[in-house]
Image (tube, grey):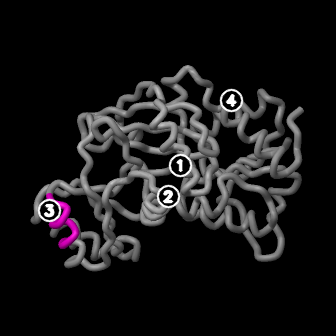
C-alpha cells in the first residue's frame, strides 16, 4: 500500500516508522505539511495515489486543520480529526475521560484570575496549573503558595492568546517519582515504560530516565477505556500510580515512541505498521502484500 506520512519535521520517531514501512514493502509518500495548500474543493496533488495518511505533524494547529481537510476530501487519515480535537485539548480530554468513568485527577476550569485563585485555594497547595493546549511539559506550573499563584495567574492573564485565559487547575497527585506511558493501537497496548525523575515533571522530553513497565491487568483495562473515550487510534496514554491503583492524566494523539522503543523488547514501529495494515484493510480495502 501507499502510506502518506504527513509531517513538519522528520524526527527519529518518523525515521523508525519510515524504515519499518519500507522494510515491509510499502510505498511511502512523505508530505511536508508546510508546503501544502488546502482548498475547499480539491485535495493537494501530494495526496494523489495515497491509500492512507498518517498524521505526524509536530504543531497541534496543523494537525487539527490538516486532518479535518483530509477527512473532507474523503482521504483516510490516522489519527482522525475528532481524536486529534479531543486529545489536543486538556479540557476535552478530561471531560471525555470523566464521561467514560476513567479515573483522572480532580480538575476545575476557570475564566478569570479571581475564580482561578478560588479553585487553587480549594485544591490547596501544591496544585497544578496547566495550559489547555501544549505538550512536553511546557508551561506547566506546580503552584506551592498563594503568592506564586497570584504571580502565575497575572502572567497568564496578560498573554495575548485566549487559551491562556482558560485556567485549567488540577489537583496535585503524589506519585512515586515516576509516571507511566503506554502506547496503544485502538486500545490494545503495544508496550509501556516508566519515566522517572527527581523533578515533579517526569516527561522523557524533560530528561526523565526510562525503563520498561510491565502492563498489568488494571493498567491494560484503563488504557482500553481511555482509548475508547477519545475515539481510539494510535495513542500514548499517560498514567500515574496512586497507591495500589492508577489515574489517567493525559492521552496523546501524535505519540512519540522512540524512547519507548529503546527500553522495551517489543519492536514498537513494527507493531505500529501491523496496526496500519489492519486499518488499511478495514477502511480502504487494501490488503498487505
Of label 1 and label 4, which has the lower sequence position? 1
Residue 148: mark in rendering: 3
The structure residue drawn at horizontal position 69% and vertical position 52%, both measured from the top left corner, is: 78
Left or right position of 207 against 80: left
Q: For mark 4, does the 10 Å Cα neighbourhood hold few (<14), some (14 to 19), or many (20 or more) residues?
A: some
Which circle, 3 or 4, is nearer the viewer? Answer: 4
Q: Can you say whether 39 is above or below 148 in the image?
A: below
Of label 3 and label 4, which has the lower sequence position? 3
Residue 270: mark in rendering: 4
Could you tell me how far apart the alpha carbons at marks 4 and 2 are, in whole angstroms? 30 Å
Which circle, 1 or 4, is nearer the viewer? Answer: 1
- Residue annotated with mark 2: 100
The structure residue drawn at horizontal position 64% and vertical position 35%, both measured from the top left corner, is: 15
Of label 2 and label 1, which has the lower sequence position? 2
Q: Secondary structure at mark 2?
A: loop
User: What range of the chain is rendered magenta?
Assistant: 117-124
The structure residue drawn at horizontal position 37% and vertical position 42%, both measured from the top left corner, is: 246
Amino acid at each position: 500500500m501507499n502510506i502518506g506520512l504527513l509531517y513538519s519535521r522528520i524526527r527519529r520517531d518518523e525515521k523508525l516508522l519510515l524504515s519499518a514501512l519500507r522494510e515491509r514493502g510499502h510505498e511511502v509518500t512523505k508530505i511536508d505539511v508546510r508546503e501544502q495548500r488546502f482548498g475547499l474543493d480539491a485535495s493537494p496533488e501530494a495526496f494523489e495515489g495515497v491509500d492512507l495518511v498518517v498524521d505526524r505533524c509536530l504543531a497541534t494547529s496543523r494537525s487539527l486543520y490538516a486532518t479535518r481537510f483530509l477527512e473532507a476530501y474523503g482521504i483516510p487519515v490516522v489519527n482522525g480529526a475528532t481524536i486529534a480535537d479531543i486529545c489536543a485539548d486538556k479540557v476535552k480530554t478530561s471531560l471525555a475521560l470523566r464521561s467514560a468513568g476513567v479515573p483522572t485527577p480532580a480538575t476545575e476550569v476557570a475564566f478569570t484570575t479571581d475564580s482561578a485563585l478560588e479553585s487553587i485555594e480549594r485544591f490547596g497547595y501544591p496544585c497544578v496549573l496547566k495550559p489547555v493546549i501544549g505538550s512536553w511539559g511546557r508551561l506547566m506550573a506546580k503552584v506551592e503558595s498563594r503568592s506564586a499563584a497570584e504571580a502565575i495567574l497575572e502572567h497568564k492573564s496578560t498573554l495575548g492568546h485566549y487559551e491562556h485565559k482558560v485556567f485549567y487547575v488540577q489537583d496535585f497527585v503524589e506519585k512515586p517519582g515516576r509516571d507511566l506511558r503506554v502506547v496503544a493501537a485502538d486500545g490494545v497496548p503495544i508496550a509501556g515504560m516508566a519515566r522517572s525523575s527527581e523533578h515533579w515533571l517526569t516527561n522523557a522530553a524533560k530528561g526523565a530516565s526510562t525503563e520498561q513497565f510491565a502492563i498489568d491487568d488494571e493498567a491494560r483495562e484503563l488504557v482500553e477505556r481511555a482509548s475508547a473515550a477519545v475515539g481510539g487510534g494510535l495513542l500514548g496514554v499517560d498514567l500515574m500510580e496512586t497507591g495500589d491503583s492508577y489515574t489517567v492524566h493525559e492521552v496523546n494523539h501524535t505519540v512519540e515512541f522512540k524512547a519507548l522503543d529503546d527500553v522495551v523488547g517489543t519492536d514498537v514501529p513494527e507493531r505500529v505498521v501491523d496496526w496500519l495494515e489492519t486499518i488499511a484493510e478495514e477502511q480502504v480495502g487494501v490488503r498487505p502484500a
